[in-house]
Image (cartoon, helix red, strand yellow):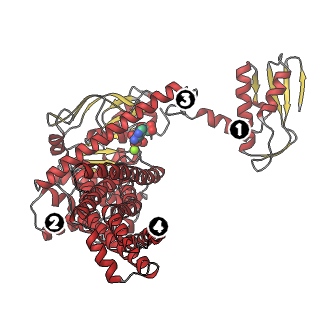
Amino acid sequence: MHSREAGSATLALGGSWRLSQRLPRLARARELLDAAPDTTALDFDTAALTDWDSGLVTFVAGLEHLCGVRGIHCRPDGLPEGLRKLLELARALPQTGRGGHAMQPAPSFISRLGSDALDLIQSTGEIMAFFGEGTLALRNFLLGRARFRRSDLWLIMQESGADALPIVGLVSFLVGIILGYIGDQQLRQFGAQIYIADLVGLATVIQMGALVTAIVLSGRTGAAFAARIGTMQVNEEIDALRTLGISPMEFLVLPRMLALIAMTPLLAIYADLLGILGGAFVGTVVGGLTLSAYLTETQLAIGWNHIIQGLIAATVYGAIVAASGCLRGMQCGRSAAAVGQATTSAVVTSIVFIVIAAAVLTILFDAVGLS
Amino acid sequence: MRIEGITLGYGDTLVQQDLSFDIRCGDVFVIMGGSGCGKSTLMRCLTGLLAPWAGRVLLQGESLWERAPAGRSVLMRRNGVMYQSGALWSSMTLEENICLPLEQYTELAPEQMRAIAEYKLALVGLAGYGDYYPSEISGGMRKRVGVARAMALDPDTLFFDEPSAGLDPISARRLDELILELRDSLGTTMVVVTHELDSIFTIADDSVFLDAETKTMLATGNPRELRAASPVVRVRAFLNRGDAG
Ligand SMILES: Nc1ncnc2c1ncn2[C@@H]1O[C@H](COP(=O)(O)OP(=O)(O)O)[C@@H](O)[C@H]1O
Ligand SMILES: [Mg+2]
């Protein structure tokens, strides 16, 4: 492939150079050049070349670059006419922009730590700003000045509330059955199956009903909020709202917050009922209790304080799901991939904050004597 | 509208710097330049969406970016904007899209609003499409509805981001004519982002040329005069399709 005479070398290129084939690596040419350090000029001999496409163009372009670095003069005369033109075309067009991202050395542990900390501070700032704007929107709503469409609110309430009934019902019923079985296995040892009703009833009303509802909603509704608002961000729909002086916080976020704050407690009550039903199913079929005994025991076990705890928790979770979905949607970048990320991160954010809220609320209720 | 020493960027990337020019009332003003040079970015700044790093945007003597957000949104309401993609609200019908600004800022009765929406749709040649959803019409139609929506509140200034991009030549010509007719009949100031030469020479009274390499404006003035006599080679080349003459 390589013949030479006094300082100048000729590279013979032969056969078929197509992208669909295995092509020689540039490293091979580099070896050849390294092996002949006294070369000052490079010619091409393409007599044996049968056909070629971009595979050859990029190879020659790379070769020219290698030669440039080594101070070797590349003489393209031997190349096919079309190929020379293509090479010139790539060189002639003005390269706009920054010419690609600059290569950055891999950051050290310390600088990674630093930039992570800065990211954390920035995202905390964004969340704070979101809550600030959200509070302002809520104030405007209470003053009757918020700009949003009431029809949107009803539609969102229906989509997030009524349409979620089957799935929330199913999951709650099954969780009731699981709790019932666990209770039955333990309490059977003492012949105290009647307390299955207490166990299932209390666990469901205080925490599980609200938690199950919230987790279903975060996957179903929170993700939908993020996708919806994120897509609007991509399509400049949010810009169009802003230029009209309509705050997206009031127009998009507020109705979603209100809808979930209103619907989650209602869904949680429904989840409680189906959870208790699931427990009753186990209590009667497996535990051998009568349905009326089970329900009476449930009634005795559950007090208003428990119901209030559950409802407060559900309201808080609803607000968390709506806020996470909307926050991630508003933060969404301007590409389809960003919408996907926004959706995922909405679900993750809401579940993390729901679990944190559950813990905090449990401690709080205990402190104020509600439990 | 006066622009004084505007510098624009995202994060820490500079897009354009040191832009100063005037947009006279009732003119068709064209922002031109190669793709990616920052035309849309400049428009985002002029319409109140992106704060400049430095400089001022004066609307009838009032500085857009030095006002509190509430005051700014009052100023912004006098502008109508047509976005590159149309940016119609996808959950609403075309009629609802046009009615939303009216609902927010006027006391009109619903049937009055519907009549206005129908009239604006007719202006852009889409009478009878009021109850279609944005997903049910073509890209070019969406752009025209975008124009209709931008005109909903009869704004003082209309901004267009690449109105004719992606349109067939006849629709593009129609849109240019529409811009001129609206300017002549309503006296609306038009700010048009475009790089279509035909369109530029048909509609522009005045223009500014943004350059991607030097990241600043290279010329301002009537594009026909610039084509003949701009001292800057790159501007002449752009206006003569690459041939600097
Ligand atoms: N949201 C954004 N974040 C960061 N950079 C952006 C963003 N939008 C545009 N840019 C950059 O700003 C420059 C100008 O973009 P733009 O104003 O859209 O150009 P055009 O003149 O084609 O409308 C481009 O180089 C682009 O990479
Ligand atoms: Mg653009």
| Mark 3 residue element | loop
- Residue carrying label 3: A102
- Say which amino acid is labelled 1: Thr
For label 2, the crowd category at 10 Å Cα-Cα, with few meaning under 14, some 14 to 19 and many 20 or more, is many
Disc 2: host chain: B
- Residue carrying label 4: A186
Give whichever of B105, A251 is nearer the camera: A251
- Say which amino acid is labelled 4: Gln
Whether residue B199 sits left or right of residue A107 in the image: it is left
Between the C-alphas of marks 1 and 2, the distance is 60 Å
Question: At which x and y percent is residue A282?
Answer: 44, 77
- Residue carrying label 1: A58
N-term-proximal mark, 4 vs 1? 1
Q: Identify the disc placed on residue B113.
A: 2
For label 1, the crowd category at 10 Å Cα-Cα, with few meaning under 14, some 14 to 19 and many 20 or more, is some
Are marks 3 and 4 in one subunit? yes
Question: Could you tell me which residue is drawn at 34 percent across and 53 percent down?
Answer: A358
Question: At which x and y percent is residue A176?
Answer: 41, 71
